[in-house]
Image (tube, coloured by chain):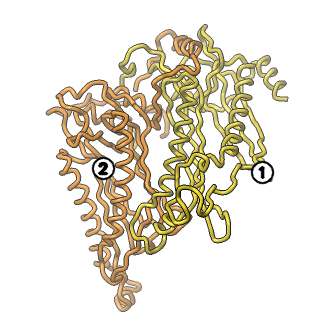
Chain colours: A orange, B yellow
Amino acid sequence: MTVNTSDALGVPDDAMRRLAQMRPGQASSLFTSDLSVNEFLLVREAGFRPLGLVLGSSIYHVGIQFGRWSKNQELESLSQAMYHARELAMTRMEAEADALGADGIVGVRLDIEFKEFGSDLAEFIAIGTAVKGDAAPATGGTWRNKHNQPFTSDLSGQDFWTLIQAGYAPLGMTMGTCVYHIAHQRFWQAMGNIGQNVEIPQYTEALYDARELAMSRMQAEAEALEAEGIVGVQMLSNTHRWGGHTTEFFAIGTAVRPLRADHVIAKPQLVLPLTDR
Amino acid sequence: MARARIARAAADGVRTSLLSADGLAGIEAAGFEMVGEVLGTAVMQIGWQGYGGCGWTPGIGSGGFYGPGQVSRPSRWSGYEPYARAVRHGRDTALSRMHQEAAALGADGVVGVRFTDERMEGQKREFMALGTAVRSRGRERPKVPFATDLGGQDLAKLLTAGWVPAGIAYGISIAVRHDDWRTQSQTGWMAGNTEVSGYTELLTHVRAKARHDFAALAAKLGADAALLSGLWSHVWPIEVGENHTDHVAECVVTGNAIARFHAGRKATTSSLTILPLRSSR
């Protein structure tokens, strides 16, 4: 963003006049947003108007699952819980955006917080800013996705601006999860490996399997949205409160569709910052 | 004492500031000059929180003893209102004292406001607002100085884009929900995968209330938008009687009300794509 400071020494007379004329209590179409100043201005520049902060939440009791702990396996019941609770939070956020008549939700954050009270209780929360396009996409159609739902995107305002500049539009956040149990080593196997540098194949296989499952599920969601690809993918692994052998592998990204055939952005100008960071 | 400090600052021209060098460059680019550091503080005693049980009595109310507990009866949610009112009052007092200092220095606004809310011994809480007062180089003056928790850089970007900070907005909400047989059956170890609908409703309620208060305060200022700088929520159990716990949820929303002063619908900024020549390490 360029800030032009040359005009009239940047004297903020217009701004101060606006404050002087402010009429408290006057009804206005106020919107709220949790975007930073940079993100807010860039989302405006990309041609979108924020409509309001939208939020969805679910406090979920995650069940327990018994299995054969000597075997590598997915814990389907836990995977199911992680899917279902996130789905509840996301759907509620989308419903709020839909009620505002939004075209999409930007800057979505999807968090899980395990609660101190009660075991196996976690809050799943989705927060973002609902936006509406100033105009329909240049290529026609709407900004909403093929289910006529607002698009969702976990990209920052900066990435969102760049994506639109490059001729892409977000379709929706796609995710895949897999909660996996890695087999406990058999006693003699563990004893045999003491003091040696060796690969432990069952660990390698387990991590491979679990990540593959999570990523292929994310891919399936993108295919269902008829996306061209997924950007900004993060591959997270989190043991939450399940201890060392049970881990959630979670893949999340934003599925995008092309708005035009070429995807050229202005050639970046090189700058040499005079700061350390 | 504060008055003496302000009078001295106004007279001797020695400027103190909490801004970083970048922040200072920011306010100068926006057409302001720094006036000095301003402070407002208030210590509140918050004793009575207004909580007189969850309002639930066996066999009374539409839920009945074995029925699902109601979650939206207004009287139940409003149990903690005196507490919320005391916190709001503490913050408002600190903020208005800071405003008075700024006005005494002839400032047009206060940037980079930091709020602290510290629990002292006993039931006392100190609320403090600390910021840097700035003055426009132009001729126009607002009726009351604006305040924002944004720094100088953000102020410059907002003003260039045609937005001016109008004030700091704040929303707080706190509520309690009775744990009934349904919550208990949803959280027991036999429950399996299930949403705990009572807690979800409790949190949704306090968040909605805090967000609503926040937006209402920004609207009352006459602003066009409010950018959140924090949304914090917390749930904790309270022991209300023998073998029974209820749950309390609190939510605090803070942010900046901003007002638009450029006429067009289109954004007035234009971004350049740049590639910083930093080393990648």
Q: Which amino acid does the dot numbered 2 rest on? A: Gly
The amino acid type found where label 1 is placed reads: Gln
Q: Nearer the viewer, residue B44 or B77?
A: B77
How many residues crowd around disc 2 within 10 Å: few (fewer than 14), some, or many (20 or more)?
A: many
Q: In the rendered view of the protein, which quadrant contains the N terminus of chain B?
A: top right
Marks 2 and 1 share the same chain: no
Chain of the residue under label 2: A
Whole-number angstrom distance, CA of label 2 to CA of label 1: 47 Å
In the image, is residue A248 above or below residue B29?
Answer: below
Q: Which residue is mark 2?
A: A253
In the image, residue A14 sits, relative to residue A172, either above or below, namely above
Disc number placed over residue B261 in the picture, else none: none
Q: Position of residue B119 (x, y in %)?
A: 73, 49
Secondary structure of the residue carrying tag 2 is strand
User: On the rendered structure, is B209 left or right of A246?
Assistant: right
Q: Position of residue A185 (x, y in %)?
A: 36, 84
The residue depicted at 43 percent of the width and 34 percent of the height is A52
Find residue B114 and report its image quarter: top right
* Residue on which disc 1 sits: B123
Q: Position of residue B54 (x, y in %)?
A: 63, 56
